[in-house]
Amino acid sequence: MSDAAFIRLDGVSKGWGGSVGARELSLSVPQGAFLVLLGPSGCGKSTTLRLIAGLETPDAGRVLIDGRDVTHATPAERRLSMVFQSYALFPHLSVAENIVFGLEVRRVPRAERMERLERALELTGLAGYERRRPGELSGGQRQRVALARAVVADHPLCLMDEPLSNLDAKLRHSVRQDIRALQRRLGMTVVYVTHDQTEAMTMADIVVLMRDGRIEQAGTPAQLYKFPASVFAAGFVGSPPMSLLPGEALPRPPGLALDPGAVTLGLRPECVRVVAPERGMITGVVRESEFLGAETFMVAVTPGGSLLTARVPGDPGITAGVTVGLAWDWADLHVFDRATHRRLRGATVPAGGDVTSPVGATSSLEFFTSPAAE
């Protein structure tokens, strides 16, 4: 993967009447990267993809691909492929005919078409299915046909809009592995739209989390998980999400100079330990447990009425209504400004890291050095 920007958005905005799809987006995507646009419905991720594709023209800003300004270029002039949620296959054509249809339209010589077809069939595991029609294929196989069509186009950029949302959970897992392996093998730059954080976290080199037409946070999956830039990012990324509580709900962290009423505190479920009530930093009453085999997610109600989720190995055998102790390391606590909802600081942020505080907090970790009570 090259560090050079292969796709660049410079202050791109797009709206329709009173509805805004994209607000002043600026983004650089390295060549060969797998970038995922993640977010809830209506956040602007599909609009952003369509702006890159040339299916929409921005009201402001520029779109550059491989160093060329393509803001007003047609999709065909941008040298890209698209894979859609609906597969977009012709039902009356065979698998082979669907795959090479675009090449025929572009009048690519037959010998070259057949060579590209054979390679695409091999890469997507469709060899032997050439003569079947879409109606004779499973959902996963149809999506592989759509992928094969993108492969034969031989373009350096592929855009994917929720391509797995019509598949069941097992197929989604299988096909997303196929897509990622294919992207790595071909070295394509991929921009992939999804609302499914599992897809984003398992497939992406770069995740761009969007909200209300803006970029909420961009980074590697690990960066979004470990260093959420806002309450929204903390609550959206992670399954189950980070527990977010008012500052008054937890013991005051050692050395925290801020008023507890001015902050929101966050803890990931795997950072919360369930102990005997007398050994906890606080107590909680178990509201529900979700047993998943290797682990159990336990939700407890704190004395102030907030919810705190703990991830416990195996089956602890603790039922609803039982009072438990809850403990954690100060190093695992995340702190957000309650007014702006932006991250202030936390032990997972390196000292001197890029932490912005509207209320004067620094990125120093000194106040997170106390061991947890046990």
Image (cartoon, rainbow, N blue to C red):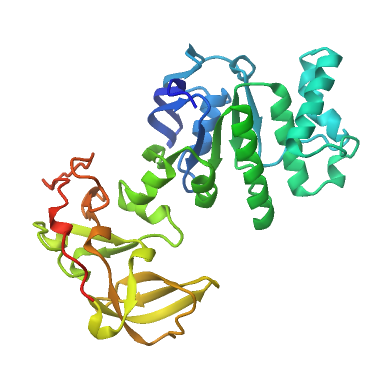
In which quadrant is the C terminus drawn? bottom left
Along the viewing direction, whichever of 22 and 37 lies nearer the viewer: 37
Q: Is residue 221 left or right of residue 302?
A: right
Residue 88 appears anywhere in the view: no
Considering depth in this image, is 177 or 320 the residue closer to the camera?
177
Does residue 135 lie above or below 154 as drawn? below
User: Residue 185: image x %, image y %?
Assistant: 63, 31
Residue 181 is situated, as x and y percent measured from the top left of the image, at 63, 38
Give the image quarter of residue 214. top left
Across and down, in percent, residue 315 comes to 49, 79
Total count of labels = 0
Above or below, 290 relative to 101: below
Residue at point 78%, 33% (across, down): 122
> In the rendered image, is residue 146 in sight?
yes
Q: Which residue is located at x 81 percent, y 21 percent?
A: 115
Residue 347 or 110: which is nearer the viewer?
A: 347
Q: Which residue does the image show at 38% across and 56% down from the upper left?
A: 235
**In the image, residue 53 lies at what x, y percent?**
57, 25
Q: Residue furthest right?
A: 131
Q: Residue at x 61, y 33 (%)?
A: 183
Depth order, front residue of 70/276? 276
Is 28 left, or right, of 307 in this rendering? right
Left or right, 189 with respect to 221, comes to right
Q: In the rendered image of this protein, does residue 219 appear above or below residue 265? A: above
In the drawing, does residue 68 fall left or right of residue 225? Answer: right
